[in-house]
Amino acid sequence: MTILGINRVLNIVQITSGGRRYTCPTKEMNGELFFIFKNEWHKVEDFTSEYTSEFNA
């Protein structure tokens, strides 16, 4: 699983997993950003790469 993009305005991330793309909601907890995928919260920082793009407005 890899995060393709982070959209802080809409509070979503776009991820790829198993060759498919998913859009997942995000939530900030204790100053860290998390996303929910398959009913489990994951830390955004753990799945970003140098190719991840971020949108801030």
Image: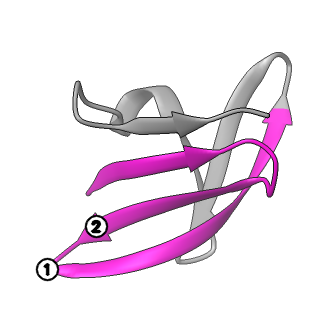
Q: Nearer the viewer, residue 11 or 33?
A: 11
Q: Which residues are magenta?
A: 1-28
Q: Is residue 25 left or right of residue 55?
A: right
Q: Main secondary structure of the magenta part?
A: strand
Q: Residue at x 28, y 67 (%)?
A: 16
Helix, strand or loop at mark 1: loop
Q: Where 53 falls versus 37 (above or below)?
A: above
Furthest residue toward front: 57
Of residues 57 and 40, which is closer to you in this image? Answer: 57
As for residue 31 lying within the magenta part, the answer is no
Question: Residue 4 magenta-drawn?
Answer: yes
Horizontal and vertical percent for residue 49? 25, 30
Q: Is residue 50 above or below residue 37?
A: above
At x 23%, y 35%, the residue is: 51
Query: What x and y, as percent, mark residue 23?
Result: 54, 73
Residue at mark 1: 19
Query: Which residue, as the protein is rendered here, is positioned at the far bottom?
Result: 20
**Residues marked 2 and 1 touching at CB (< 8 Å):** yes
Secondary structure category for the residue under label 2: strand
Residue 48 pos. (x, y %): 35, 33
Q: Is residue 43 above or below residue 24?
A: above
- Residue occupied by mark 2: 16
